[in-house]
Amino acid sequence: MLTMTTLRAFTCDDLFKFNNINLDPLTETYGIPFYLQYLAHWPEYFIVAEAPGGELMGYIMGKAEGSVAREEWHGHVTALSVAPEFRRLGLAAKLMEMLEEISERKGGFFVDLFVRVSNQVAVNMYKQLGYSVYRTVIEYYSASNGEPDEDAYDMRKALSRDTEKKSIIPLPHPVRPEDIE
């Protein structure tokens, strides 16, 4: 199945076709202006996987950010989601690999992402892809139904520019969302 999959740049038209992916309760969904901002500023970091029939299978959305001087220039995964019927095909790993390659070309020191502490399937997948928990961010995810807010792991993977792997040395204590740059 993956051999017949097309990985291509996300386009504005895809905003009308990706509900099958975003309906997952663990997928963060945003307003149209947010997606358009990413398309305008970081188009190379916004990739979609398309099935032979044109159905969208999954996407990754990210950006390049941080300070080069402080060795914090990096790729960031804002969203990664695969539609339920296309999971367990290696699609998420392939999309992550593409974002990592783009971040390498842009001279990033690492790639990072935030994931719900409760989303063990995703946490384990990221660990298999070489990511480790850099820090815990307290109450990063807002709850909607009266539940308490949920913590996130900030997971990182060092890129080749970080020869000493300094970017992935775990912090000893949790941080709050307002402490994140």
Image (cartoon, rainbow, N blue to C red):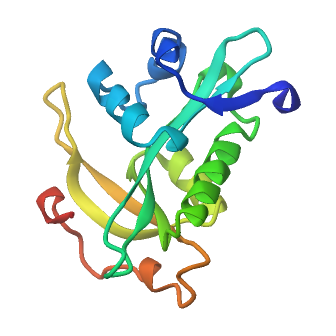
Q: Can residue 61 be seen from the camera position used here?
A: yes
Given residues 74 and 114, the one toward you in this image is 74
Give the percent coordinates (x, y) of residue 175.
20, 68
Give the residue displayed 72% in from the left and 36% down from the top.
88
Q: Is residue 164 left or right of residue 55?
A: left
Q: Is residue 104 left or right of residue 85?
A: left
Give the percent coordinates (x, y) of residue 62.
45, 45
Given residues 173 and 131, the one toward you in this image is 131
Query: Where is 51 relative to 98, above or below?
Result: above
Give the residue displayed 50% in from the left and 49% down from the top.
120
- Which quarter of the image is occupied by the N terminus? top right
Residue at far bottom of view: 164
Give the residue displayed 40% in from the left and 25% down from the top.
25
> Quadrant of residue 85 in the image?
top right
Q: Can residue 31 be seen from the camera position used here?
A: no
Give the percent coordinates (x, y) of residue 19.
47, 13
- Which quarter of the image is occupied by the C terminus? bottom left
